[in-house]
Image (cartoon, helix red, strand yellow):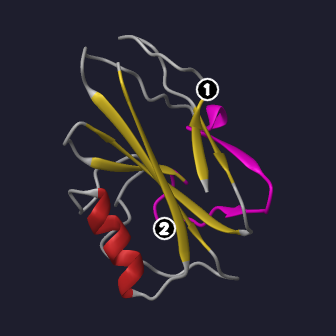
Amino acid sequence: MKIKPLRKNYSVGDTWQTVVDIPRAGFLSCYHQSDDGPITQVSPIQPNAAFAVGEGQEISIPNPSEGFDIKFERPGVVEKLMCILEISTKPMAIQNVRANSVLGPMQVHSFEQVLDAYRKKDAYILWGQIQDRG
């Protein structure tokens, strides 16, 4: 799975847009973190929702229709995005990873903890990560 930024360089005040290339059908979840701050689920933005995707799709993260942006607000801050594609016919209930509210902070402190939650369920996943500095 590839995650690509729409631009090569970003400055403070710019909005970060990425595209995720989907290699196989499944369920996509994406997570954002600024530096070492809280992790937020940014796709799907509804807690405990499943986002079914098809092979060959290109998905914009964040999705412009969902009404939020990821902005570079301070110089030198690293914005990180990790997406996980769960290859299955129905999504697994991954405990302690989902947020309790839309775009709320999650109960994990690192992307590795998010991956561990999927691994504990023996989920077959593909994942990718990208980061940029403003």
Picture coordinates of residue 68, whole percent (x, y): 50, 31
> Where is mark 1, residue-wise?
6
Q: Is residue 123 magenta?
A: no
Q: Is residue 106 above or below residue 64?
A: below
Characterize the magenta stretch by its predominant secondary structure.
Answer: loop
Residue 63 forms part of the magenta stretch: yes
Amino acid on which the number 1 mark rests in the picture:
Leu
Q: Which residue is mark 2?
A: 48
Mark 2, Cα crowd under 10 Å, few <14 / some 14-19 / many 20+, is: some
Hey, which quadrant is residue 99 in on the image?
bottom left
Residue nearest the observer in this picture, 101 or 29: 29
Please name the residue shown 63% across and 31% down the image. 64
Q: Is residue 54 above or below residue 124?
A: above
Magenta extent: 44-66
In terms of secondary structure, where does tag 1 sit?
loop
Return the x and y of residue 127 as percentages of the image width and height: 51, 62
